[in-house]
Amino acid sequence: MNAYHAPENLLAGKIILITGAGDGIGAEAARCYAKHGATCILLGRTVSKLEKVYDDIVAAGGSEPAIVPLDLKGATVSHYQQMAQTILDQFGRLDGLLHNASVLGHLSAFKDIGEDEWRNVMQINVNGTIFMTQALIPVLEKAPHASVVFTTSSVGRKGRAFWGTYAVSKFATEGAMQTLADEYQNKSLRFNCINPGGTRTNMRAQAFPAEDPATLKTPAEIMPTYLYLMGDESIDVNGESLDCQPK
């Protein structure tokens, strides 16, 4: 899918929300979506990082983004409902939602996973994603064709030793996507997963500290798949889990 060449106006006029938009893949996706015509809503917990992405987009001539400072760890259903209402009031609809924000937790034997560790990873990777999606579905339904993209991982398809917390959270992500895709089959809203693969990000460095980052693709190099799933050329793609870097 990384051979996909997106037209410059692929996302013209679209309103797209990106979570974890402050750095890494989320920041690159926001810049890339804006370059292709979208108005981006940047969601993240660190305002200074979101402002940097905002400045990058404006400097490149993109539409002025919106900033939503929100920490998924402490966010409640009420926060997501308020956010959805604000987006509806300001933009009238939402054309795309990229669930990029995730935390890795610590790699450990399954029997050693602590309660706080488990709750923290599930709160951000699963609960936050699900409650935000629920709140935003009515806003997404206002769009002619809307795309929701969840972020998965190879360990969310086949469990891997010592990756217990993160792996289970990504199995849940895949399950949520498949359930929603089946519910919304043949409707204006589609749900898919994207697996970025090994990419030069802080999370990857945390998981593989001895790895040479120069051997990995940059976030910019995997953007074709992100563009494809968010653009109208993937209108008929629903319930799929795509790899940015097929083995």
Image: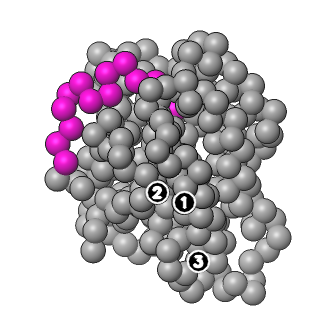
Whether pointer 2 and pointer 3 mark residues with C-beta atoms closer than 8 Å, the reply is no
Residue 234 drawn at (x, y percent) = 32, 44
Which amino acid type corresponds to the residue marked 2 in the rendered image? Gly
Q: Is residue 239 magenta?
A: no
Does label 2 or label 3 sit earlier along the sequence? 3
Residue under circle 3? 163
Whether pointer 1 and pointer 2 mark residues with C-beta atoms closer than 8 Å, the reply is yes
Residue situated in front as seen by the camera: 6 or 56 = 6
The quadrant of the picture occupied by the N terminus is bottom left
Residue under circle 1? 178
Q: Is residue 142 left or right of residue 208?
A: right
- The secondary element bearing badge 2 is classed as loop
- The secondary element bearing badge 3 is classed as loop
Q: Which residues are magenta?
A: 4-18
Which amino acid type corresponds to the residue marked 1 in the rendered image? Gln
Does label 3 or label 1 sit earlier along the sequence? 3
Label 2 to label 3: alpha-carbon separation: 25 Å
Residue 164 drawn at (x, y percent) = 64, 77
Please give the name of the residue rendered at 69% of the width and 84% of the height, measured from the top-left corner: 110
Label 1 to label 2: alpha-carbon separation: 5 Å
Which amino acid type corresponds to the residue marked 3 in the rendered image? Trp
Residue situated in front as seen by the camera: 246 or 137 = 137
Q: Which dot marks residue 196?
A: none
Residue 125 drawn at (x, y percent) = 64, 56
Q: Residue furthest front?
A: 186
Please give the name of the residue rendered at 31% of the width and 59% of the height, measured from the top-left corner: 244
Q: Is residue 106 left or right of residue 120?
A: left
